[in-house]
């Protein structure tokens, strides 16, 4: 791996357009990863609300659908790791089942539904908050997006005050057509770690990219950032919890830092806004940092890339090889 050279934080051609820009004079955003998950049970209303109160401009969360069509805010395909429940979400009902599940971490919380999180960001004081939804690959995208669309459509002003703030985070190209069909006014971002996959399957169909921070540290990651800036594509970085990583994100010019530590991130941002010299590390540290973690090295990155591609092919709702999707052809076929 060659040492990266962070790009200048110049705004993209579309930097001021639409509610998802959220940046004033190039200001980087802080988005709560599963809410304020460093301190509270992840993906709960308590965690989301705390992240907003701590200053997050956005919430990153995950969705799964139950057998009775309820969309839940939950990361894992199974309940076991973080709750007192057991088994796969897609094999269970909400009513009489998952509705009674509670978190292991204190304070004990129920699993929130998508409609509850939407209601939270539609409260008058929260209408600036972006919702970045990680659409998990184990779900049937048709079922998932139809149910989400029904909830969104229940708000008469959704097209003006809600969907411009919703980002559909897509790992798998299988989700592109259903997302465009059922939620056409929501932004689409590819979530991933592979730049070749991002370019091949998502470049034309997505407004931006949510990429793992260690991958952005590579020389290829720096080239990808430059391409995105030239083409007006936004880039977010996850999951960024350390001060140096946050500063590096700012220097690279990403749109948003996705972090478990919202209050800390907001504080670090305030520090460099008061004193911009804090963005420039000492010369020696500037040289050392890109080599400071095994995650930044090419060999482990190559191993992770192979695992992720294999995971996408084997564990998606419809297993099999990844296939390119042409949204223009689909729109033409429907006479749009």
Image (tube, rainbow, N blue to C red):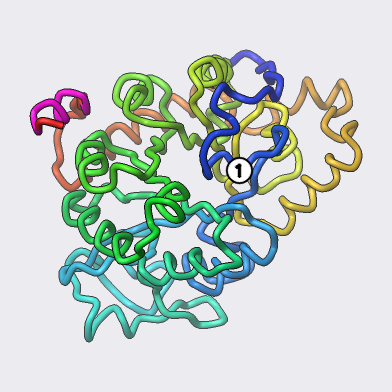
Q: State left or right for residue 80 relative to residue 267.
A: left
Position in image of residue 22 (x %, y %): 61, 43
Report the residue at 62% width, 44% height from top: 240
Does the magenta stretch mainly form a helix, a strand or a loop? helix
Position in image of residue 182 (x %, y %): 22, 48
Q: Of 67 and 186, which appears nearest the observer?
A: 186
302 lies above or below 106: above
Residue 335: quadrant of the picture: top left
16 lies above or below 96: above
Quadrant occupied by the C terminus: top left
Bounds of the magenta segment = 327-334
Quadrant occupied by the N terminus: top right
Report the residue at 69% width, 16% height from top: 5
* Residue bearing mark 1: 22
Q: Of 119 and 29, which appears nearest the observer?
A: 119
Q: Of 99 and 29, which appears nearest the observer?
A: 29
| Few, some or many residues within 10 Å of mark 1 (<14, 14–19, 20+) | many
Residue 332 magenta = yes
Position in image of residue 76 (x %, y %): 36, 59
Position in image of residue 295 (x %, y %): 57, 33
Residue 198: quadrant of the picture: top left
Residue 206 magenta = no
Q: State left or right for residue 178 relative to residue 73.
A: left
Report the residue at 91% width, 38% height from top: 275
Report the residue at 77% width, 24% height from top: 288
Residue 331: quadrant of the picture: top left
Q: State left or right for residue 105 relative to residue 203.
A: right
Q: Secondary structure at mark 1?
A: loop
């Amino acid at each position: 791996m060659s040492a990266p050279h962070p790009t200048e934080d110049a705004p993209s051609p579309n930097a001021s357009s639409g509610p998802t820009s959220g940046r004033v004079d190039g200001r980087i955003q802080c988005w709560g990863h599963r809410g304020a998950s460093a301190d509270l049970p992840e993906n709960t209303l308590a965690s989301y609300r705390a992240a907003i109160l701590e200053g997050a401009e956005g919430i990153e969360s995950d969705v799964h659908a139950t057998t009775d069509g309820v969309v839940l805010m939950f990361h894992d395909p199974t309940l076991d790791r973080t709750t007192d429940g057991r088994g796969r979400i897609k094999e269970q009902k909400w009513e009489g089942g998952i509705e009674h599940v509670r978190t292991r971490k204190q304070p004990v919380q129920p699993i929130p539904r998508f409609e509850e999180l939407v209601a939270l960001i539609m409260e008058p004081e929260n209408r600036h908050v972006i919702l970045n939804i990680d659409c998990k690959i184990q779900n049937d995208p048709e079922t998932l997006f139809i149910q989400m669309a029904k909830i969104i459509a229940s708000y008469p002003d959704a097209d003006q005050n809600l969907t411009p703030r919703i980002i559909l985070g897509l790992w798998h190209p299988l989700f592109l057509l259903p997302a465009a069909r059922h939620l056409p006014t929501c932004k689409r971002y590819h979530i991933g770690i592979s730049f070749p996959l991002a370019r091949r399957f998502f470049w034309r169909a997505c407004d931006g990219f949510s990429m793992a921070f260690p991958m952005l540290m590579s020389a290829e990651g720096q080239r990808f950032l430059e391409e995105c800036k030239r083409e007006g594509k936004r880039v977010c970085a996850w999951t960024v919890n350390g001060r140096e990583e946050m500063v590096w994100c700012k220097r690279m010019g990403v749109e948003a830092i996705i972090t478990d530590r919202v209050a800390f991130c907001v504080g670090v941002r305030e520090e460099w806004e008061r004193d911009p010299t804090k963005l420039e590390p000492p010369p020696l540290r500037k040289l050392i940092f890109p080599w400071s973690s095994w995650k930044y090295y090419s060999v482990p990155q190559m191993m992770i890339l192979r695992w992720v591609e294999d995971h996408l092919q084997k564990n998606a709702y419809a297993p099999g090889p990844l296939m390119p999707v042409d949204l223009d052809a689909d729109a033409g076929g429907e006479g749009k």
